[in-house]
Image (cartoon, grey):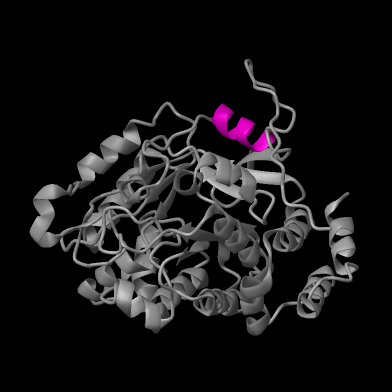
Amino acid sequence: MDATKKLEFLIQDKNLDTDLRHIAQKVLQSERISFDEGVLLYEKGELGYLGVLANYIREKKHGDRTYFNRNFHIEPTNVCVYDCKFCAYSRMIKEREQGWEMDVDGMMDIVKSYDDEPVTEVHITGGVVPKQNLDFYAEFFKRCKTHRPDLHIKGLTPVEYYYIFKKAKLSHYDGLKYLQSCGLDSMPGGGAEIFHPEVREKIAGDKCTAEQWLDIHEQAHKLGMRTNATMLYGHIEEFWHRIDHMERLRQLQDKTGGFQTFIPLKFRNQGHQMSDVPEVSVIEDLRNYAVARIYMDNFDHIKAYWAMISRDTAQLSLAFGVNDIDGTLDDTTKIYSMAGAEEQHPGMSTQQLVELIKNVGRHPIERDTLYGVVTDYKDVVFEGTSKPKYYALPVVE
């Protein structure tokens, strides 16, 4: 049964809650759901129901196509002036001897180590320290582009930019325009956490506000840059806080069209000040991906970071609205592993990623940062490829 028939079958179920049937009908008719309906999906939507709706949207937009890229991370420092309660990665300035602070030469050494590798993107983000200022990143971007012009620089989050531009006495627009001229190509989505101040002030009260985060992305979009967006879920927030977060992103996307991908990030509870908060289940992970796909109707892509949620859960997520599972990573990020992610040494070869996608019946495509097709792996067979393995998914009767 294809995705459309499954949705139509669901709508005809006489036992389906009236409100949920109405939302399913809106999805079938490509109508936007409201804030209250988004909250209702969290409150009433069971996993099977949400999966049918989210997969319908996913397949309508992308079919079976599932994207990944060949990338590596540079984390210039884990020392930080901010004290986010959920962060196991950073070390405060007074604890800087426990962390690392790279110079531009050290960052370039990492770039050069990939000279013979077919990577397409370097992803740069980390802590915030005064000496890694505007001039620091301008020099790195210039040197990186000079050394390897084809390497896409996806660099820094609004948390970092807000501090850097304030220190340099530049507007968000002017600061981004200058760094764009130095080689910056796009911006990742980190630092969004939860926008609503009821939650944000408790978990990350000293970093940039939601309004500042959104403005920096808006200015990047005005400059023609594409950016991503994230949401940290599964801690002290309520369902309506999640929808409030997604609603603010949806409104900005209506205005600018500059976001590419929405990435729900699971709260992991090891090694930080919120370790007493339990993690949500895999069922809730999948429900959250599905609600995101249903609510974020103007976002092309929903991404799951396999390094954060495990390879198995990433495979399952492909039936719940996700169409991108990030990249090869090559053990170059510590942000997830230090907070307790299953992948303590995250790295997969291209063959492993392709097989992970194919093993759940999806169509793997290696992309560049802007979702241009690098290689279509649909009919590629690697030597030693394992037999497909399919997961039993919930069935709605």
- Vertically, is 159 above or below 113? below
Q: Residue furthest top?
A: 383
How far from the left and from the top, in percent, is residue 357?
A: 64, 37
Judging depth in this view, the residue of 337 and 182 nearest the camera is: 337
Tell how many labels.
0
The residue sitting at 65% across, 22% down in the picture is 386
Q: Which residues are magenta?
A: 350-358
The image quadrant that residue 202 belongs to is: bottom left
How far from the left and from the top, in percent, is residue 243?
A: 56, 76
The residue sitting at 73% across, 33% down in the picture is 378
Magenta-drawn stretch contains 348: no
Magenta segment's dominant SS is helix
The residue sitting at 55% across, 74% down in the picture is 246
How far from the left and from the top, in percent, is residue 224?
A: 53, 66
The image quadrant that residue 23 belongs to is: bottom right
Q: Is residue 47 left or right of residue 183?
A: right
Q: Is residue 61 left or right of residue 110?
A: right
Q: The C terminus is located in which quarter?
A: bottom right
Judging depth in this view, the residue of 262 and 194 nearest the camera is: 194
How far from the left and from the top, in percent, is residue 186?
A: 46, 58
The image quadrant that residue 346 belongs to is: top left
Q: Residue furthest front?
A: 15
Q: Is residue 123 left or right of residue 325?
A: left
Judging depth in this view, the residue of 16 and 96 nearest the camera is: 16
Q: Is residue 105 left or right of residue 196?
A: left
Magenta-drawn stretch contains 351: yes
Report if residue 169 is visible in the image. Answer: yes
Report if residue 171 is visible in the image. Answer: no
